[in-house]
Image (spheres, rainbow, N blue to C red):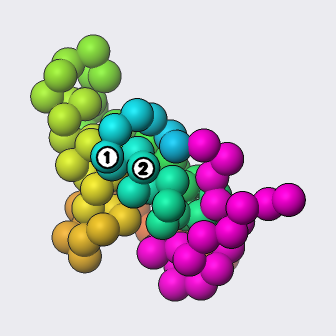
């Protein structure tokens, strides 16, 4: 049976993650409040952040930046927007 969560990003009850994405308090908060589809949105956004900012994941500052962005993405309205990037569903065809 699929575990359902009240998704903080989508504002509705949706299938939740199968397990916390990583250990710790933030991982638990995400597990309890984020749907699978919202997690995928984050993964896509994270790739854009890495590419746009030229982040090197071996650098602790880059990992710290991504963790801050992750928390903001789900639990704040202060999400960094990537200049010049438009989500696919908003692009004109």
**Residue lying at 60% horizontally and 70% vertically, measured from the top left:** 5
User: For residue 13: magenta?
Assistant: yes
Q: Nearer the viewer, residue 30 or 45?
A: 30
Q: Residue at x 19, y 35 (%)?
A: 64
Residue that protrudes farthest toward the right in the picture = 1
Q: What is the x, y in percent for residue 14? A: 67, 73
Residue 91, how many percent across, how many down? 56, 74
75 lies above or below 55 = below
> Is the stretch drawn in magenta largely helix, strand or loop?
loop
In the rendered image, the vertical position of residue 78 relative to residue 58, given as above or below: below
Q: Is residue 55 above or below residue 25?
A: above
Residue 35: numbered disc:
none
In the rendered image, residue 23, in percent from the top left (x then y), is placed at 40, 34
Residue name at image x 59 percent, y 64 percent: 35
The image quarter in which residue 73 lies: bottom left
Q: Is residue 54 left or right of residue 6?
A: left
Q: Nearer the viewer, residue 58 or 71?
A: 71
Residue under circle 2? 28
Image location (x, y in percent) of residue 77: 25, 76
**Residue range highlighted in magenta:** 1-19
Q: Quadrant of the N terminus?
A: bottom right
- Secondary structure at numbered mark 2: helix
Q: Inspect this view and state whether residue 21 appears.
A: yes
Q: How far apart in space, not on screen, are marks 1 and 2 (Cα)? A: 5 Å
| Residue 83 placement, left or right of 15 | left
Tag 1, which secondary structure?
helix
Q: Quadrant of the C terminus?
A: bottom right
Number of numbered discs: 2
Q: Are marks 1 and 2 in contact (CB under 8 Å)?
A: yes
Residue on which disc 1 sits: 25
76 magenta-colored: no
């Amino acid at each position: 049976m699929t575990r359902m969560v009240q998704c903080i990003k989508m504002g509705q009850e949706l299938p939740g993650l199968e397990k916390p994405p990583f250990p710790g308090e933030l991982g638990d908060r995400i597990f309890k409040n984020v749907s699978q589809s919202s997690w995928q949105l984050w993964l896509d956004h994270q790739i854009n952040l890495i590419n746009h900012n030229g982040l090197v994941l071996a650098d602790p500052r880059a990992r710290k930046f991504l963790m801050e962005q992750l928390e903001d993405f789900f639990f704040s309205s202060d999400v960094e927007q990537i200049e010049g990037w438009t989500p696919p569903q908003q692009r004109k065809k």
